[in-house]
């Protein structure tokens, strides 16, 4: 990763009527870095992305995107950014080649045919170049959308839940491509709901109800959560499960296959709640690493409590 920040914004705020959708958000992304943007539906992720790429103007806040003023130079920012939306937004009755030719002409790229051919080859689309976009699977539609986003060689790529509805193999191939692009110096901000995708990012940020709750590497965010996790091996009776879930100090109880993850922030209370299970010869209780999913469940619950 290169030095310097491709995104460096502070206090971004956006209101729609009386509702504050983005509330005093600070975000920095280094050049060549992949940052995952996480949060529940309606948390402000998409609005923040649109503020960054110049599609919306902030009501308050300041900063730069690619060295340009985020509020005053939105037109210049748009020309240097690739933005992939949640929904497939290309013409389904045109072929892959025809869609990319249309996009190339929008950007004024020349020569058009050569630019399209290079883009097709770069993302493995050449063999399907004459296929109608509407007949593509989710993974190939995703690849077409990415091709259109990077054809004009942007410096910053903004991806809004790009792999929703895509099978695991296509998701992995997509992320391999994102890391290849970042290795060439492209900066990426990607919103996602998938924990495995978040773990492939250099850093992550979590937003809820318009407020940024945590930023850092995955390890830093997990450590900063203060959560402690134990795993119970063996089959609990319904009565044991109800008693454990209601015990003081137990914040989360989640089954994972044949095990049960029990999570809390107070180690003494958690161990007291688990003590009866340690005396059951059919069960085994042992400490384990807290997962990113455990942390985000905590964030969501805390944010909902504050909103309520």
Image: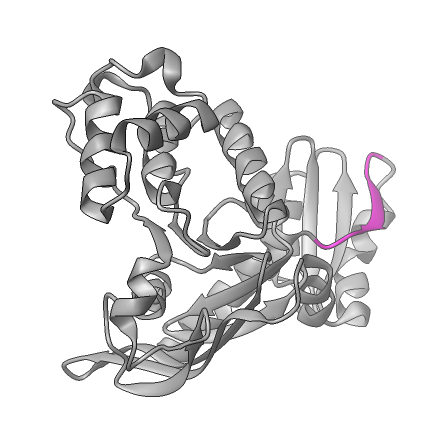
Expressed as whole percent of the image width and height from the top left, the position of residue 16 reads 17, 77
Rendered position, 260 above or below 166: below
Closer to the camera, 268 or 74? 74
Rendered position, 245 above or below 15: above
Q: In which quarter of the image is the N terminus?
A: bottom right
Q: Could you tell me which residue is drawn at 42 percent across and 69 percent down?
A: 208
Question: Visible in this render: residue 113?
Answer: yes
Q: Does the magenta stretch include residue 289?
A: yes
Q: Could you tell me which residue is drawn at 44 percent across and 60 percent down?
A: 39
Q: Could you tell me which residue is drawn at 63 percent across and 46 percent down?
A: 183
Expressed as whole percent of the image width and height from the top left, the position of residue 14 reads 27, 79
Name the side, left or right, on which 122 lies relative to 72. right
Q: How many marks overall? A: 0
Name the side, left or right, on which 187 lies relative to 81. right
Q: Hey, which quadrant is residue 164 in on the image?
A: top left
Closer to the camera, 186 or 211? 186
Residue range (magenta)? 282-290
Rendered position, 92 above or below 103: above
Seen as rendered, the residue at the extreme front is 111
Expressed as whole percent of the image width and height from the top left, the position of residue 259 reads 71, 37
Rendered position, 236 above or below 229: above
Q: Hey, which quadrant is residue 24 in on the image?
A: bottom left
């Amino acid at each position: 990763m290169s030095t310097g920040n491709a995104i460096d914004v502070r206090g971004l705020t956006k209101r729609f009527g009386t509702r504050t959708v983005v509330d005093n958000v600070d975000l920095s992304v280094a050049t060549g870095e992949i940052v995952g943007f996480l949060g529940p539906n309606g948390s402000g992720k998409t609005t923040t992305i649109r503020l960054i790429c110049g599609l919306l103007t902030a009501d308050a806040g300041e900063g730069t995107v690619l060295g340009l003023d985020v509020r005053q130079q939105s037109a210049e920012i748009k020309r240097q950014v690739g933005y992939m939306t949640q929904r497939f937004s290309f013409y389904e009755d045109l072929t892959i080649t025809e869609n990319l030719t249309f996009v190339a002409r929008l950007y004024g790229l020349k020569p058009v045919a050569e630019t399209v051919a290079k883009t097709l080859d770069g993302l493995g689309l050449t063999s399907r170049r004459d296929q109608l976009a509407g007949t593509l699977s989710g993974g190939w539609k995703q690849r077409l959308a990415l091709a259109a986003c990077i054809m004009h060689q942007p410096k910053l790529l903004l991806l809004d839940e790009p792999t929703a509805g895509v099978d695991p193999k296509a998701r992995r191939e997509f992320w391999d491509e994102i890391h290849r692009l970042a290795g060439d110096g492209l900066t990426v901000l990607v919103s996602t709901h998938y924990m495995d995708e978040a773990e492939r990012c250099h850093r992550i940020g979590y937003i809820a109800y318009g407020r940024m709750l945590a930023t850092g590497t995955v390890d830093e965010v997990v450590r900063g959560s203060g959560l402690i996790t134990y795993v119970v091996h063996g089959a609990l009776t319904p009565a044991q499960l109800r008693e454990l879930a209601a015990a003081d100090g137990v914040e989360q109880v989640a089954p994972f296959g044949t095990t049960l993850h029990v999570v809390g922030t107070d180690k003494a209370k958690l161990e007291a709640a688990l003590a009866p299970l340690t005396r059951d010869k059919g069960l085994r209780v042992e400490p384990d690493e807290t997962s990113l999913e455990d942390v985000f469940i905590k964030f969501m619950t805390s944010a909902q409590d504050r909103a309520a």
